[in-house]
Each structure stands twice: as C-alpha cells, then as structure tokens.
C-alpha cells in the first residue's frame, strides 16, 4: 500500500470516529493535545468539554483551534462532560482522550478496523506509553495479562473494564448503557459503565496495536482522586454485585486501604449515598458476575487498586 493509499484509508476511518476530550484548568496540556490531534492522518472531528475552567482554557481553544467543537459547561461536570460531548457526536465510534494524552497516528484507524470486524465488540482499549520517556504504563501489563476468557474473535485479551483516556467505543453502545454516572463524577467512573456494557451483551478488549500517549499533568489532586476513587469502588460493588460479593469487596477494602482521614472520608461519603444506591441497585446477570469474580482476584494484586496518595 502506498503512502497515499494509507492516508486515504486513515481519512476514511477518521470520518467514522470522533475524539472527545474533557478538561479543566489545564490549558497548556490541552493545547498540546489538540495540536497533536490536528496532525493525525485520520483527521477526526474533535469535541472538547471545558468543565468551567478559570485559566482561560476555552478562549485559548476557540482562538487557536477554531475547528474544534467547544462545549462550555457552567460547572465542573467531571466525567459527565463526556456525556455532554457525545450528544453532539455524529460518528459511529467515539475515542476518549484526556487533556494530557493523545492518540498515536494510525491508532484510531486501527481501532475502527477492529470494531468494524467484530460486531460484538463494544470497546477497544489501547496500549499506553508514558511520556516523555515513551515507557509502557504499568497498567498495560494488567491489560495484557487479563484473566478473563473471551471469544476467539476478540483482537486481544478480554477486559472487564476500560481506561477512558485510552479507549474507543461504539457510540450507540455508550448511549444505550447510559454513559458515565453523574453520581460517580470522576475517578474510577469507568467500572460501572463497563459492567453495564457487558450486561448489554458487549465485549471489551485490549488491542496491543492501538497506541495512546500519556504525559501526566502535574496539576493533580492525588488525595482527592483517592477519596473519590475509593468511594466509587464501594458504590459500584453495592450497585451491581450480589450481596455476598459486595460485602466481600467492602470488607477487603476496609482491611487493605490506608487507615487515614482520606479513607475515612471515602467510606463516609459512600455510606451517605447508601439510600440512592439501594434505590438504583441492579444486580448483574450470572454470566457477568462470573467475569467480575475472576477479576476480583486480579484486582486485589493490582497496583492501580491500592488507593494511596
């Protein structure tokens, strides 16, 4: 295939996938990401939800990237900013991207190819390289060594969840599953949506030949993220797992997380939400629960599940 043929194939794929970015007060990181997105051979439409930035981010995007569809939220919507953007998506596939990450040239085209070749595949999560060194993110090993068994037609290991900043999904599947929960806001918000996608009959998979780059922004509240992530993990178990599994996960977390104010606050917030959790609780079917039980063992060994910081 000539370079011209490759570029043409990439542009055809780009017409089928949109990139959605959420941001708040990370102007420099976001502009770097948008610069890279503008150079992709796929040329996908890009939508940015600005979660009420106060550092001039939206004005900078409007001035420097006029082709980007900019949505200005009046408050910080967290992950739900992605839901807002997807209301405006007109392509069959959507690629999420954080303001400090970007898709490699050709990655989106490859993801579209994989999704179109497997009608039962709902989402593809790619290989994450951490910049500036270009080293593989430690989470990739967990994706590659996922213990789940899936059908032979999957492009890689079956997954039970996904990383939003490194995943391409079917737009309709996302919408039917209800998108990201406003209750969870931001921090481990993918687990609930992933489980609802599996309940809807979709498979999730890791694709080693789909690459995304991540250069973590220094503007991070590690403790705040830990509080919300732990709270959301508890809520997820209570919302979707059978009672024995939900209790087991709760007790494991109570024993394993740091004994500090952040953990105490997370448990307090989780308990405060118990009334709505019980109202909205929908236990997953046995087949999905069987997958979640397999993942429980792997998650307890995961460095990403230590809730420290």
Image (tube, helix red, strand yellow):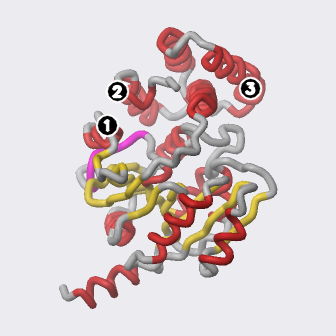
Secondary-structure class at tag 2: helix
Q: Is residue 232 visible?
A: yes
For label 3, the crowd category at 10 Å Cα-Cα, with few meaning under 14, some 14 to 19 and many 20 or more, is: some
For label 1, the crowd category at 10 Å Cα-Cα, with few meaning under 14, some 14 to 19 and many 20 or more, is: some
| Image depth: mark 1 or mark 3 in front | 1
Residue with the mark numbered 2: 298
Query: Looking at the figure, which quarter contains the N terminus?
Result: bottom left
Secondary-structure class at tag 3: loop
Farthest residue, direction right: 74
| Drawn side of residue 84 relative to residue 162, left or right | right
Which residue shows up at 30% across the image and 51% down it? 133
Which residue shows up at 42% across the image and 35% down it? 287
User: CB atoms at circles 1 and 2 under 8 Å apart?
Assistant: yes
Badge number at residue 273: 3
Which residue shows up at 81% across the image and 57% down it? 74
| Drawn side of residue 50 relative to residue 208, left or right | right
| Image depth: mark 1 or mark 2 in front | 1
Where residue 50 sits: x, y (%)? 69, 60
Where residue 194 sits: x, y (%)? 50, 44
Camera-side residue: 210 or 226? 226
Camera-side residue: 15 or 135? 135
Q: Is residue 195 above or below residue 266?
A: below
Secondary-structure class at tag 1: helix
Inter-mark Cα distance, 1 to 2:
8 Å
Inter-mark Cα distance, 2 to 3:
27 Å
Camera-side residue: 302 or 280? 302
Is tag 2's residue or tag 3's residue first in the polypeptide sequence? Answer: 3
User: CB atoms at circles 1 and 3 under 8 Å apart?
Assistant: no
Where residue 30 sits: x, y (%)? 56, 61
Q: Is residue 175 visible?
A: no
Badge number at residue 142: 1
């Amino acid at each position: 295939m000539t370079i011209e043929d490759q570029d043409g194939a990439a542009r055809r794929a780009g017409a089928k996938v949109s990139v959605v970015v959420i941001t708040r007060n990370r102007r420099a990181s976001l502009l770097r990401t948008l610069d890279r997105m503008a150079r992709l051979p796929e040329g996908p439409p890009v939508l940015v939800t600005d979660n009420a930035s106060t550092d001039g981010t939206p004005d900078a995007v409007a001035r420097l990237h006029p082709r980007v569809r900019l949505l200005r939220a009046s408050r910080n919507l967290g992950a739900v900013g992605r839901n807002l953007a997807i209301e405006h998506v007109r392509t069959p596939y959507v690629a999420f991207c954080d303001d400090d990450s970007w898709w490699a040239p050709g990655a989106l085209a490859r993801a579209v190819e994989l999704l179109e070749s497997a009608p039962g595949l709902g989402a593809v999560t790619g290989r994450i390289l951490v910049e500036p060194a270009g080293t593989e993110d430690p989470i990739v090993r967990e994706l590659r060594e996922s213990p789940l068994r899936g059908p032979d037609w999957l492009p890689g290991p079956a997954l039970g969840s996904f990383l939003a900043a490194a995943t391409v999904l079917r737009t309709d599947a996302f919408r039917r599953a209800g998108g990201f929960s406003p209750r969870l806001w931001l921090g481990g918000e993918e687990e609930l949506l992933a489980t609802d996608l599996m309940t809807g009959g979709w498979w999730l998979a890791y694709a080693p030949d789909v690459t995304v780059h991540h250069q973590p922004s220094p503007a991070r509240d590690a403790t705040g993220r830990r509080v919300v992530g732990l709270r959301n993990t508890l809520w997820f178990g209570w919302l979707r797992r059978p009672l024995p599994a939900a209790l087991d996960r709760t007790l494991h977390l109570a024993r394993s997380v740091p004994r500090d104010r952040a953990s105490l606050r997370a448990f307090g917030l989780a308990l405060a939400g118990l009334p709505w959790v019980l109202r909205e609780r929908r236990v997953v079917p046995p087949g999905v629960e069987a997958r979640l039980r397999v993942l429980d063992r792997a998650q307890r060994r995961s460095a990403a599940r230590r809730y420290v910081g």
